[in-house]
Amino acid sequence: MSSYSLKAGSLKASLALAAAALLSAGASAQDSDDQIDLSDTAFSGDYLSVGVGVVVNPSYLGSDDYVFTPLPIVQGSLGGVGISPRGGGLALDFVPDGDGKVGFDLGVVGRLRANRNSQIEDEVVASLGKLDKAIEVGPTAGVTINKVLHGYDSLSFSTDAAWDINGAHKGFVVSPSVTYFTPLSRGMVASLSLSTEYADAKFHDYYFAVSPEQSLATGGELPEFQPTGGGFTRAGATLLTGIDLDGDLTNGGFALVVVGGYSRVLGDAADTPFTSVRGSKDQFFGAFGVGYTF
């Protein structure tokens, strides 16, 4: 959803594309005295949610400059295959959802990582040029526990593992997350996600290292830095709220999505001069979008 992978760093990131998932979760919404027939909603068979919005986030992982980025939204279920958003990409789930207490996800994930490829606002960092875009592909798996505190909420655990196949950082990234979802009314739902990201040494060398030549090119503004190896790059939280415009999320149609979040860069991502000298360890982001389900 953004150049900052939040779900969104992607605080897968990109974090805010996951907001579209709230549109499908509307099938569980309820009023306190109104039981819903879940077999007769806009989400009980094949459906597709599409939308657009805008996100404000750091111009690169560790930056203290903020930029606006368009937010596309795609979410749905077609032929038993679930489609879920990721920051800069999508995940496909090949395990059909059931009506039981526990559900499982297993599929593939793909995303575009454009860290320090565009909208580099810091002039010193920009002087080193743009990095290549990474295309990350790999498996995704998860488990969801339904009816945790009441009949319509859920607690989900998921992990994406992806490798760069475009020759940019040439490494791999693992992104685990835990999400609690609950309806607030028949027309409003909320989701709180905690996530982190682990990357290997190749990833760290590509995004966080400052060579002697690069330090010299910046006139010493960026001191030399050699990452210590693989490790966690960030951890954060994201709050997402979905609001149906006709007050009934179960019938599809138009809905608004509002997202806010915070993440803290860690390890080499925090120690690199791109962050410690020119940026900030504290990363904030927000998004607003409108989608339509049919």
Image (spheres, grey):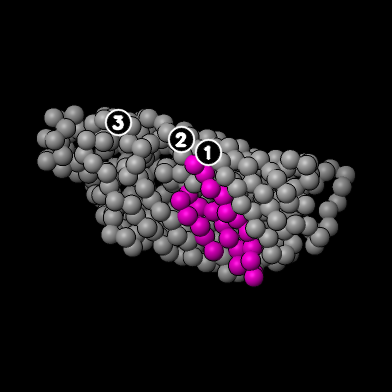
Residue 255 appearing in the image = yes
Q: In this rendering, is residue 259 above or below 99?
A: above
Residue 180 appearing in the image = no
Q: Please give the residue where the numbered disc 3 appears in the rendered image.
A: 122
Q: Dot 3, how many residues are within 10 Å of its Cα: few (below 14), some (14-19), or many (20+)?
A: some
Q: Please give the residue where the numbered disc 2 appears in the rendered image.
A: 68
Q: Please give the residue where the numbered disc 1 appears in the rendered image.
A: 54
Instruction: State the CA–CA distance, disc 1 to disc 3.
Output: 21 Å
Give the residue at x 22% y 35%. 127
Residue 201, percent across and down? 27, 53
- Asked which secondary structure carries label 1, the reply is strand
Contact? badges 2 and 1 (CB < 8 Å): yes
Dot placed on the residue nearer the N-terminal end, 2 or 3: 2
Instruction: State the CA–CA distance, disc 2 to disc 3.
Output: 15 Å
Dot placed on the residue nearer the N-terminal end, 2 or 1: 1
Q: Dot 2, how many residues are within 10 Å of its Cα: few (below 14), some (14-19), or many (20+)?
A: some
At label 3, which amino acid type do we have?
Asp
Residue 125, percent across and down? 25, 35
Total marks shown come to 3
The magenta-colored residue range is 70-92
Give the residue at x 43% y 56%. 111
- Asked which secondary structure carries label 2, the reply is strand
At label 1, which amino acid type do we have?
Val
